[in-house]
Image (tube, rainbow, N blue to C red):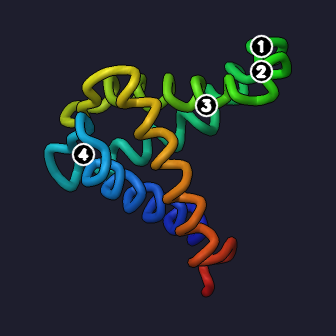
Amino acid sequence: MKQLIIKWIINSTALLVVAHVVSGVTLDNWMTVFAAAVVLGLLNAFLRPVLIFLTLPVTVLTLGIFTLFINAFLFYLASHLVRGFHVAGFGRAFIAALVFSIVSFLLSLFIGANGRR
């Protein structure tokens, strides 16, 4: 349970960084940040594996680059599911998903897998 909360905090922080760095991505308030982080986590946990499986031939042909488009689609979808989380378009969602992935990866490295530094 502790690891889940730590991951939620990491994703929330990454989402805040994205909102400040990428123009066209806005979050109305703190509750929106936390709700969007939960929705992104659930989409990545349940829908992403299905999409990757369904698009496996395209992903193999593009040497994995198509996965970036799947991440952007999930980010854009989350903006439609969470009230107060706005993304200006798919291009902004693509950039935001890249920044989100990099920031959450770096924060996970800094904090560590088990929540200890």
Q: Which residue is mark 4?
A: 32
Circle nearer the N terminus (2, 4): 4
User: Which residue is at 31% across, 56% downward?
Assistant: 16
Tell me which corner region of the image, top left, top right, bottom left or bottom right, holds residue 67.
top right
Between marks 2 and 1 in the image, the one whose residue lies nearer the viewer: 2
Give residue 43's position: percent from left, percent from top. Answer: 54, 32
Q: Amino acid at mark 3?
A: Leu
> Badge 4: how crowded within 10 Å, few (<14), some, or many (20+)?
some
Secondary structure of residue under mark 2: loop
- Image quarter where the C terminus lies is bottom right
State yes or no: discs 2 and 1 in contact (Cβ < 8 Å).
yes
Give residue 68's position: percent from left, percent from top. Answer: 61, 31
User: Which residue is at 83% across, 16% downward?
Assistant: 61
Q: Which residue is mark 1?
A: 58
Distance of label 2 from label 1 (alpha carbons):
6 Å
Q: Amino acid at mark 2?
A: Thr
Residue 62: which disc? 2
Distance of label 3 from label 2 (alpha carbons):
11 Å
Circle nearer the N terminus (1, 4): 4
Residue 75: which disc? none
Circle nearer the N terminus (3, 2): 2
Q: Is residue 35 left or right of residue 63?
A: left
Between marks 1 and 4 in the image, the one whose residue lies nearer the viewer: 1
Q: Amino acid at mark 1?
A: Val
